[in-house]
Image: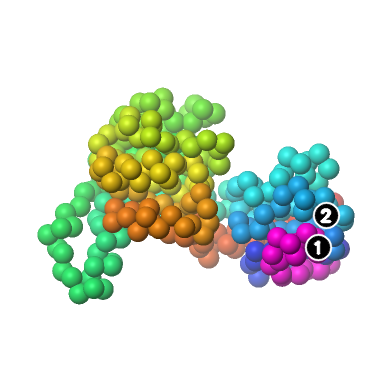
Amino acid sequence: MKILISDGLSKKGQEIIENAGIECVNQHYSPEELLENIKDYDCILVRSATKVPKEVIDAGENLKVIARGGAGIDNIDHQYAKTKGIPTLNTPAANSASVAELAVAHMFALARFLHKSNVTMRDGKWNKKEYKGIELNGRTLGIVGCGKIGQLTAGRANGLGMNVIGYDPFIKEAEGIEMVSFDELLAKADFVSLHVPKQAEPVIGAKEIAKMKDGVYLINCARGGVVDEAALLDALNSEKVAGAGIDVYVEEPTNNIELVSHPNVSVTPHVGASTTEAQERVGSEIAEKIVAALKG
């Protein structure tokens, strides 16, 4: 058996697969090349860079498993794969702590102007009087999506002395979070942090932003498209939104230069899961799942 590792895998993860007698091929193909070569593999393992649409699944004559090292599987046509009897594996909790910490990091960056001062000081400027920040202690954090990542974010926010409220249509109780309606969260939160899967429509658009406090901070380390980027840019320009921390974008790499270069935006290039610890957890967990599926 042979597995295509399209977007990389930790050394420990690859060792787990190879020790099970499965050949690993580390190769990132272009979409056209993938269509041509996928027939040679029993399994494809991707991260966020490689897409696995219906055409690739059909071309994968020997495909038995599709795997995603990470939580979201929106880059895989998993529903179609299911109709062909091909399971889609992922690691929904392995990178949760890393994403939660990045969300908090963006809150700190915005609250204390780290995103600005790191640039202006390199230009030789000493803008001390311009960087009068706020404390996170005592502020209200509204978490939209109270699954594993949302709850870990809440735990860290509680430790900072923040008041945490949350909304999730599927979760009624969560430790350290006062569950409220969506509208109440929008009205009360000083910071709004999104922890939801990709949606057909934005969760936060112009209508939702209008219901927020003036001077709110918005954090998106979830998925590109859950925030309407045009509406967010308008709100930043009007100062309705005081600042935004963004790790994910509608298009990646993003070409929305006006948004990412806005002076009140703290940005990262989709690095929520990019920690040593998360990569080790993701690699080992997805490797074990692949071996179980192919050998079981």
Q: Is residue 159 magenta?
A: no
Name the outermost residue toward the left: 129
Report if residue 97 is visible in the image: no
Q: Are marks 1 and 2 in contact (CB under 8 Å)?
A: yes
Q: Nearer the viewer, residue 79 or 165?
A: 79
Marking on residue 75? none
Q: Which residue is mark 2?
A: 59
Q: Which residue lies at the image location 82% right of the left edge and 50% below the top edge?
A: 58
- Callout 2: helix, strand or loop? helix
Q: Which residue lies at the image location 63% right of the left edge and 46% below the top edge?
A: 74
Label 1 crowd (10 A; few <14 / some 14-19 / many >=20):
some
Please tell me which of labels 1 and 2 falls first in the chain. 1
Residue 13 sits in which quadrant?
A: bottom right
Marking on residue 36? 1
Q: What residue type is disc 2 on? A: Ala
Q: Nearer the viewer, residue 75 or 188?
A: 75
Task: Give the answer, above or below, for where 99 lies relative to 193.
Answer: below
Classify residue 53 as left or right of residue 171. right
The Cα–Cα distance between marks 1 and 2, rounded to whole angstroms, is 8 Å
- Callout 1: helix, strand or loop? helix
Q: What residue type is disc 1 on? A: Glu
Classify residue 84 as left or right of residue 272. right
Residue 114 sits in which quadrant?
A: bottom left
Q: Where residue 59 sits: x, y (%)? A: 83, 54
Q: Nearer the viewer, residue 64 or 215?
A: 215
Q: Where residue 124 sits: x, y (%)? A: 20, 74
Residues in magenta, as a range: 16-38
How is the model colour-coded? Answer: rainbow
Q: Where residue 193 sits: x, y (%)? A: 40, 42
Q: Where residue 21 sits: x, y (%)? A: 84, 67
